[in-house]
Image (cartoon, rainbow, N blue to C red):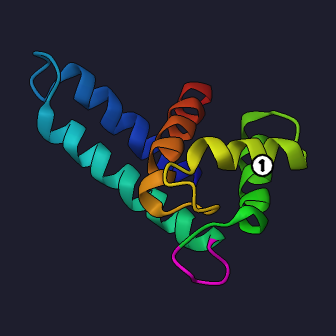
Amino acid sequence: MVAYKRVLLKLSGEALSGKEGHGIDPDVVGAICDKVKEVAKEVFDLFDSDKSGFIDKKELKPLLDKISKQLGLPSPDDKDIEDGLKQLDMNKDGKLQFNEFLPFYQQVYEQLMAKA
C-alpha cells in the first residue's frame, strides 16, 4: 500500500503540474480517478464479506475501524456506525451499494493522501 501511495502522489503531482509543466493534465487526472475507483471497488469487495454486493452494518464496522486507525482517529462505536450508515445509505435500504460507497471512499482517500 505504501508503494501505491507513492505512485498516486507522483501522479497527483504530474496532474497538477501537467506533463509539460503547463497546468493540469486531464489525462493524468482521469487515470488517477480511474485508479481510485478501482481501489475503492477492491476495498468494497474486501469488506463485503458475504459477497452480497452490499456492505451492511456488520461489515461496515471493520471497514470504519480500519479507516479510523489509518487516519489516527478513535474507533467508531455502534452509534457512529449507525449514523454513518444512515448518512451514506442514499436509498435507505439499510446497506451500502458500491455507488453509495464510492463518494465516501473518495473523501477517505483525499484525507489519507493529505496525511502522506
Q: Position of residue 114 (x, y in %)?
A: 55, 25
At a point 50% along the width and 32% down the height, the residue shown is 110
User: Quadrant of the rendered structure where residue 71 is?
Assistant: top right
Q: Main secondary structure of the magenta part?
A: loop
Q: Identify the secondary structure beneath mark 1.
A: helix
Asked if 110 appears above or below 79 in the picture, the reply is: above
Residue 53 drawn at (x, y percent): 51, 76
Q: Is residue 58 left or right of residue 37?
A: right
Residue 103 visible in the displayed image = yes
Magenta-drawn segment: 48-53
When asked about the image quadrant of residue 8, the answer is top left
Relative to 11, is 24 on the left or the right? left
Q: Is residue 76 visible?
A: no
Q: Quadrant of residue 11?
A: top left
Q: Is residue 86 above or below residue 116?
A: below
Magenta highlight on residue 52: yes
In the image, residue 88 lies at what x, y percent? 57, 46
In the image, 36: left or right of 19? right
- In percent of the image, x 74 and y 50: which residue is there? 64
Residue 26 magenta-drawn? Answer: no
Q: Amino acid at mark 1?
A: Glu
Q: Which residue is mark 1?
A: 82
Query: Residue drawn at (67%, 50%), measured in percent from left and top?
Result: 85
